[in-house]
Image (cartoon, coloured by chain):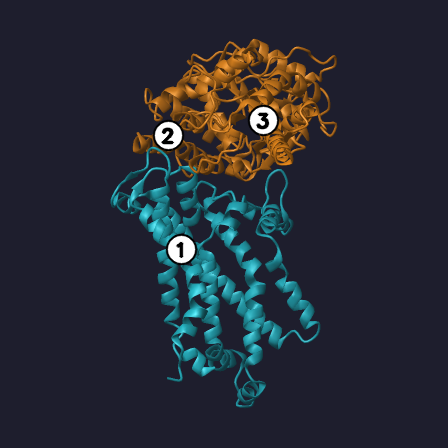
Amino acid sequence: MNQVLRDKKAIAAFVVPGLILYTLLVILPIVWSGYYSFFDGTAGMKNWAFAGLKNYGKLFKDKNFLNSLSVNMRYVLMVTAGQVFFGLLMALIFKFWVKKFGALVRTIVFFPVVLPTVAVAQLFAKIYEIQPHYGLLNSLLAGVGLESWVQPWIGKSSTALGALAAMDIWVAIGFYSVIIYGALLDISNEIIEAAQIDGCNGLQLFLHILAPLLRPILVTCVIFSFTGTVKMFESALALTGGGPGTATRSLSMYMYDTAFTYMKTGYGSTIALVIFLICVVGSRIIRFFDWDYRK
Amino acid sequence: MTRKVLALVLALTLAIGMVAMAQAKTISFLSIWAEDYDNGKLLTDLSAKYKEDHPDFDFELELVSSDNLQQKVATLAVSNDLPDVFAYESGTPLKTMIENDYVLNVSEALRELGVEDCIDAGAYSFLTNLVGTEDLYDLPLGLNIEGFWYNKALFEQAGIEAAPTTWDEMLEDCEKLMAAGIQPFAVGGADQWPATRIINAYVMRKLGVDAMNKMAAGEMSYTDPGMIEAAQMLQDMCEKGYFGVGPTTVDQNTAAQMILAGEAAIIYNGSWYTQDLVAPTNPAGEDGIGFFNIPTVEGGPGTLTEYSMNCGTILCLSKDKYDEETADWLKYIVTNLGDYAMSEFGALKGYVINEYPETMSKYSILVAEEMGKVTGTSTWFEAAMSSELSNIAQVNVQSLMNGEMTAEEYAQSLQDVWDANN
């Protein structure tokens, strides 16, 4: 086997087909977008013309772009933190508290992951509803006497992004809890017992034993969650349509509007490149936390 | 000899085959309606009838969501792959298609076929005005008037005797409704366009029916005091609670049902609403919903016989794909569409109707009567806007309703987009 893998022809035979596909499907479109970002107008229409760096200059003066960037970043922070935190919490509950019906509980917690985004959004739209009838949330609030808290959750700029983030956290908790639970199972019970005999309380056990051992998987989860939330699109589209106003309009949604509704392919490509850069740089930053403590 | 016979037979087979191939025509239709719904059903039914006499003909419907229609058509147009027939938006989107020479000159085609007079004259002038051409480049698939629909029982309950004719009267009626514990308006703020229509309604009365066109053409500014007043009116009505709590979370279908169910009194809607009204499930009954045209605004030139009209989504034909077979089908469609739509759906589609059905619902008669009063028309708010401007107008109207943007800022946001693109 070693000999085969040292043979350059063999390497080529294994790598080249995949590389060609990857180049065609991933790298080429990125380069193409880069090329488009120097143009103005609609690709293929008469107004298509070279514009130099105009699109890049426009980017940082564009209020809508900056607003979408800010919405997107706040969303990433809230949702990534929420998904991984609650996933971890749920995994710890699975491991230490749920003794009976473990498989059943895990299945129920995982269930939202398999629901289509649009169905989840419809569900939450009903939960947050205020007109013509109070939805679940507002009914509960009114029921316990918190009438002053009743409000159009997805109809106000101040609450819409939070309401959307809550939905996306709820959907993904099951996914992250199962991944982290898997990693928890890998940690030998002897270590945990030893720590408990040494007199570790729950918090100490978590901070000094579990957290360091879970770090690689937590970093992976953060990267998953980060890349999933940077491209924020379908859940926002389905729940709020980016509204009210532009309160929940993400970069991807703005890119889509620009390229396909305003038909400004060049400027849309420029925004797409920014999203690409954020993904690359963001993942890189998160990887810094993945140092190997044994070295 | 045998060889010659064989060659002849083969040649004949080939020729016959080619003739057969030439006759077999499949018309592809890019639709936003499913085969069993609305205009999708209309065209599918008519094509099926046409197929009875033309067995080689076939009709294929491809469904696309209305949100994606413009993008899809634009992409297909650029890649020279437009379907024979497709649903599209009139106004600026169609104008772009005409300028780029993608769509068939329908007037010319109908003239050649000798069926030009099948299109209703009002619809003809309305559609050509929307794109500013003399010739027609699209076919109507609906002709609607818009205005306010109200729940008669709720008006009675609040002690309102007659539908308002001035905007001030309408506001007074809102106060009466509020006092009686009734939500005056329902609006589908989540869908955005129902909200901009209310601004449009005020603008067409305050500044005249052509104000929005003038603004798009740069002859008037979007920051005109009349426009700001209209935006302010919508915001004030929201603040006073006329639209209930959180109107930007309600979609237009829900809002429309709220009127029927008596949960709100008035809605701005088009005459396509009659489909809901005539449904046996309408809790308001056969005569429970009334209509009043947009009330007049003091000091404005608008009158009560000017209506906001809407042709809905229109039908275009690809210029490249147009051939004899399509022409023959087109002739059949335009000559039969009006009567068929009236007898089957009770709907006006913008074609000449030769035969009215004997029994028409009260609501269909109501619409027909209102149509008869029209002396001037205005289009919808975004008709003359570019797709970017239209998007901004709709997105920002939610901020305006929520009080997160002032009327001046709203008007300025429209002018800013216009300035950046002209």
Above or below, B408 against B345 in this view is below
Q: Which chain is orange?
A: B
The residue carrying mark 1 is A73
Residue A263 vs residue B254, the one in the foreground: A263
Q: Position of residue B113 (x, y in %)?
A: 55, 14
Distance, label 1 to label 2, CA atoms, is 29 Å
- From the viewer's perspective, is the residue at label 1 or at label 2 nearer? 1
Which residue is located at x 32 percent, y 23 percent? B218
Residue B189 vs residue A116, the one in the foreground: A116
- Element class at badge 1: helix
- Element class at badge 2: helix
Q: Chain of mark 1?
A: A
The residue carrying mark 2 is B411
Residue B348 visible somewhere in the drawing = no
Q: Count the marks: how many? A: 3
Q: Chain of mark 3?
A: B
Which label sits on residue B260? none
Give the amino acid at mark 1: Met
Q: Position of residue B115 (x, y in %)?
A: 56, 12
Give the amino acid at mark 3: Ile
Q: Quadrant of residue B211?
A: top left
Residue A223 vs residue B357, the one in the foreground: B357
- Element class at badge 3: strand
Labels 3, 2: one chain: yes
Q: How would you rate the neighbour count of disc 2 (Cα within 10 Å): few for under 14, some for 14-19, many for 20 or more?
A: many
Q: Chain of mark 2?
A: B
Distance, label 3 to label 2, CA atoms, is 24 Å
Residue B232 vs residue B398, the one in the foreground: B398
Quadrant in which the C terminus of chain A appears: bottom left
